[in-house]
Every structure is written in C-alpha cells, then in structure tokens.
Image: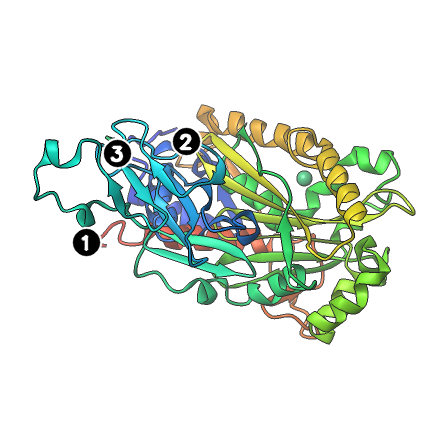
C-alpha cells in the first residue's frame, strides 16, 4: 500500500481516469486535502455560483451578504434597481465591510476606520479625509472590487470570478428549459420566503451535490421512515419512475413520476385555481410534465441543488421549491444554505402551509435532512481511513457507479432537452459530474511535466 506524498501524482491521476471510465470512483478523491485546493481553484474559480434571488432584494438599498467559497460577497440593489455583487471587503485594510446578513442601507460604513461606500461601491467618505491624506487622495481609485461577472436567470442571481467565463445563459444551456418550467410557471415567478437557513455539516461538497442531483436511489432506504409513516409508497422502485436527464456541464434533473406515468397528485398538490396560469406561462410539453410530476430533484453544477416535492396529507397537499447551496469550507465540511421558494401568485394560506411542510422535511428541523446528514458524515469518516486513501487502489477502494451503464438507452420521445433516460435509478448524472470534475481539475495540471 502506498500513500503518495503528492496527490497530484500523475500515476494516481491516470489510474483515477481509468477507473472512472469503468464507472468506478476511487474513494481517495472524496476528502483529499490537496485535491480540495485544486477544486477550489480550478472549479470554483471559473464556475457560475449561486448568490441569491431577486426577491431577496426588493427595494433600492436592499442588500444580502453571501459567500463564493471563501470570498465574502455583498449583493446590493442600487438606486436604479440594478443588482451588483462586490467583494465584501473594505479597500482600506481589507476587513469585512458589512457584517449583517441582510438589510437596507443608503451606504456602507466600515467598522474598522470608518470609510464609507455608496450603493454603487464608490468610496464616498474618509474619516478626517484631507487632514490625514492631503488633497491628492483620489477616492475613485478606492471603490469596492466588483465580482467580475454577474448573471440573472428566472430571478436567480449568479456570480463568476472569471471575467472570461462563458455567459450564465450559455452555461445553464439545456437546464434553462427545466428552470423555466419550475420557476417560470406562475405570474411573477417564484419568491423566497424568510432568510435562507444555514448550518455546517460534516460532508464533502461533491457527495452532497451528487446526493441531490443524481441519486433518487437512496430515497427508499435512507428515508425509509416516510414509507413506514405511509407518506411514500411501499414499492421499492417508487423514486425511480420517470426520467433522469443529463446535460452539458453536468447539470442534471430527475423528473420523478409514478409507475404508470400518470399523476399521483395533479400539479403536485397546487391549488386548482393556479393551473390555468401555469398553462399560460409554459409550453404544452412543460405543462404536461407539471401535471404529472411527483418530484423534481436536480442540480446546477457545481454546488447548487434543488428539490420540488409534494408534501402533506390528503386534502392538505402542497408543493414548494427548495434550493440548497453546498458551500465548501474544507474537504470535510460544507456550509449548507437552504432557501424556501414558493409561487409568488399562490394564495397566502397555501404559502404558509407549504412553509410549515418545508420546515418539517428540510433544514435543521427537517426529518429528511437528518437522514441524509448522517450518511454524509459517515462517508467523510470512512474516506479518511488508510484503506480508502490508498491511491494505488490495492484494497479495491472504489465506489460503484455502474447503475444503468451501457444498459439503459435514452428515451428519444422525452420532450425536454438533454439526454433523458427512462428511469431515475441510474448513475448517469453522477458519472457526468465525475467527468466534468476530472476535466476541470486536470486542466493544465501536468503541463510543467510536459504531459
Ligand atoms: S479597514 Fe475599513 S476603514 Fe480601515
Ligand atoms: Fe435524501
């Protein structure tokens, strides 16, 4: 057995690539610290990262503070209604400028020496200004640093640290069709209610992202209690009916339906009064899917996941959209950010009931959340052992991603874009996520060695 001192050993990478082509994932990649640094630089330094939703910034002066991995971000609406993203750091000595989660301000004053900045990030005030710096201090050179690119789609705000990255719309690609269906079905779109919940979990971001984007297979076992309580069906295949759709950049969605493809509950339990509005806002193909779907669950690579389930009991059913951002804060930790979205046009009482349902299932008080969190922590624990860290794979220390490989053919009749397979018990999205991951982290990796 051999623990390479250098993770970026070419031999280990070669073996990694070979195994991944066979549908296997060497387990050492899960929490390897050097690889983690590489992921942050090569993936997060160039990808579109979710920052928030337009409904969180209602008025001029509204702001929220967010993170792009370790970069603190200040997202703010200016007087013209434009949303900008700045590094939340004072240009004087760099301390965090705004320390609140959200609020509304005319300007931001630094807690350290009192410099102040307006809603456009311009430096507008220096304590004792000319007396300490003289006449020549040019304030225009000391404005807040902007996140190089910001993009908005269906109200979702994303940022990118790479000024040369492709546009957000190009990056989302085929996923836009599915986002339009989920987020554009109602007049006024979706809105966020409350603050996003946040907590730290012992988990690796790759495992959590995959759990949501690509793994309906875990549902019937991990969340067995929902079957025992009579909320989910006994049939062990129940979360597998429907289509798994794989897209460029490793975005993916599972459109889970019923065994027959008919609706278990029409339009996921939304009030019937809303259905004509859906019809008006989406295409006939999207409307048909909305009428029959049980759960949408998927992800925008690298670290945004979403789930749109049916919750409640007969006569009190509701549907909401939950966004989850897995902010990596180390190879063995994520800060989970969890947003509750609901159709802006939904009746007030329905929104309230749906919010209660969400709190019972997801977030720190949610039962489903606790099921998942425990499994993720155990993956981290196991991955830190000597056997799992062996890069020569002498212990056959690989995970199995063989489900459906070279066996399930795409369903050409599925109306949505992307490659759609006629089952959700499938590792197609996972394999695509691994492929994307390897491509991004290996970019220019061995150039110096002449490879
Ligand atoms: S660090 Fe902000 S004013 Fe000095
Ligand atoms: Fe789960």
Mark closest to the chain's N terminus, 1 or 3: 3
Disc 1 element: loop
Q: Secondary structure at mark 3?
A: loop
| Residue at numbered disc 3 | 94
Q: Camera-side residue: 48 or 255?
A: 48
Q: Position of residue 183 (x, y in %)?
A: 64, 59
Q: Nearer the viewer, residue 330 or 121?
A: 121
Question: CA gap, disc 1 to disc 3?
Answer: 39 Å
Residue 69, percent from left and from top: 40, 39
Q: Quadrant of residue 221?
A: top right
Q: Which mark is residue 450?
A: 1
- Relative image position of residue 435 (x, y in whole percent): 46, 54
Q: Residues within 10 Å of mark 1 (few under 14, many from 20)?
A: few
Tell me if mark 3 has few (under 14), some (14-19) or many (20+) residues whose alpha carbon lies within 10 angstroms of its own.
few
Which quadrant would residue 282 be assigned to in this image?
bottom right
Looking at the rendering, the quadrant in which ligand 2 lies is top right
Q: Earlier in the sequence, mark 1 or mark 2?
A: 2
Q: Please state, as top left, top right, bottom left or bottom right, where the C terminus lies in the image.
A: bottom left
Q: Residues within 10 Å of mark 2 (few under 14, many from 20)?
A: some
- Observer-nearest of 67 and 259: 67
């Amino acid at each position: 057995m051999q623990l390479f001192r250098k993770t970026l050993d070419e031999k280990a990478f070669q073996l990694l690539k070979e195994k991944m082509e066979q549908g296997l994932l060497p387990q050492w990649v899960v929490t390897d610290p050097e690889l983690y640094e590489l992921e942050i630089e090569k993936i997060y330094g160039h990808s579109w990262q979710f920052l928030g939703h337009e409904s969180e910034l209602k008025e001029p002066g509204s702001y929220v503070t967010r993170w792009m991995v370790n970069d603190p971000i200040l997202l703010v609406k200016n007087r013209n209604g434009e949303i900008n993203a700045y590094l939340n750091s004072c240009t004087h000595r760099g301390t965090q400028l705004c320390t609140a989660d959200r609020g509304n301000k005319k300007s931001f004053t630094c807690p350290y020496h009192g410099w102040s900045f307006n809603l456009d990030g311009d430096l507008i005030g220096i304590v004792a200004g000319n007396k300490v710096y003289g006449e020549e201090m040019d304030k225009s050179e000391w404005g807040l640093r902007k996140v190089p690119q910001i993009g908005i789609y269906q109200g979702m705000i994303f940022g990118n640290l790479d000024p040369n990255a492709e546009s957000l719309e190009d990056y989302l690609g085929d996923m836009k069709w599915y986002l339009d269906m989920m987020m554009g079905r109602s007049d006024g779109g979706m809105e966020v209610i409350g603050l996003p919940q946040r907590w730290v979990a012992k988990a690796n971001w790759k495992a959590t992202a995959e759990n949501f984007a690509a793994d309906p297979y875990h549902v019937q076992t991990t969340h067995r209690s929902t079957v025992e309580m009579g909320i989910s069906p006994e049939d062990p295949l129940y979360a597998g009916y429907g289509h798994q759709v794989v897209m460029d950049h490793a975005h993916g969605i599972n459109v889970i339906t019923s065994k027959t493809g008919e609706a278990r509950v029409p339009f996921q339990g939304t009030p019937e009064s809303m259905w004509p509005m859906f019809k008006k806002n989406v295409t006939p193909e999207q409307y048909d899917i909305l009428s029959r779907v049980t759960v949408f669950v998927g992800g925008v690579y690298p670290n945004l996941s979403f789930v749109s389930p049916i919750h409640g009991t007969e006569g009190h059913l509701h549907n909401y959209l939950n966004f989850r951002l897995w902010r990596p804060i180390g190879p063995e930790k994520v800060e989970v950010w969890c947003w509750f979205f609901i159709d802006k046009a939904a009746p007030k009482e329905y929104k309230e009931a749906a919010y209660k349902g969400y709190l019972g299932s997801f977030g720190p008080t949610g039962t489903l959340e606790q099921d998942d969190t425990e499994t993720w922590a155990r993956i981290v624990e196991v991955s830190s052992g000597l056997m799992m860290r062996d890069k020569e794979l002498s212990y056959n220390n690989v995970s199995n991603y063989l489900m459906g490989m070279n066996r399930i053919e795409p369903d050409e009749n599925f109306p949505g874009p992307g490659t759609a397979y006629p089952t959700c018990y499938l590792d197609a999205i996972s394999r695509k996520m691994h492929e994307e991951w390897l491509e991004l982290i290996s970019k220019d990796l061995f150039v110096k060695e002449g490879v």
